[in-house]
Image: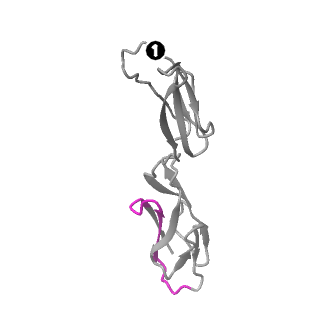
Amino acid sequence: NPGLTGTLTVTYIPSDTDAAKSVTWATSDSSVATVSAEGTVTAGTTYGTATITATSTAFLADGKTHATATCTVNVTERIVPVTGITITSPTQTTVNRGDSLQMTASLTPADTTQTGYTWSITKGGTAAKIDASSGLLTVNKDSTASSGTQIEVTVTSTSNAAIKASRTFTV
């Protein structure tokens, strides 16, 4: 996830090597992940994959080659699941034929990344209609529904259908 950090460590083989035990660090893509001189990796703002390379400052037996080790870092979108939904407006519970009401909802937690939801009428569908995406509720002015008819509006998370809230209106 962008901004998260972790520290890489190097294991020397053999562990009792006489070679200098120090490395330089490098990244294949600093927009995906950066690495400090101490091996601390920080996820960048770009999603993707970066290869972090540790290169020994000591030469191998041939006197020309440095030992290297790599680690692949994948930076992906942080997913914060939706855990609840509440209808925030309107607060009224009675409506008249011909009324139009803009429904609004709030999600919890506030930083959820699963922000989609849809609106539906779950009771009294002949007395009203609702735009599934905008939440505009329109009570039919020519409805034959009798006074006292109940209209239940439900908002449902598109990420988890078990997360929903309802409000009942009386005509």
* Tag count: 1
Q: Residues within 10 Å of mark 1 (few under 14, many from 20)?
A: some
Residue 125 at x, y = what percent? 48, 79
- Is 66 contained in the magenta span? no
Residue at the limit of the structure toward the left, as seen here:
15
Q: What residue is shown with label 1?
A: 19
**Which range is magenta?**
143-164
Image height check: is 11 above or below 52? above
Secondary structure found at label 1: loop
Image height check: is 31 above or below 99? above
Residue 82 at x, y = what percent? 46, 52
Which residue shows up at 58% across the image and 30% down it?
26
Residue 122 at x, y = what percent? 44, 73
- Is 147 contained in the magenta span? yes
Image height check: is 159 above or below 138? above
The amino acid marked with disc number 1 is: Ala
Which residue shows up at 61% across the image and 74% down it?
99
Which residue shows up at 52% across the image and 35% down it?
4
Q: How is the image coloured?
A: one colour
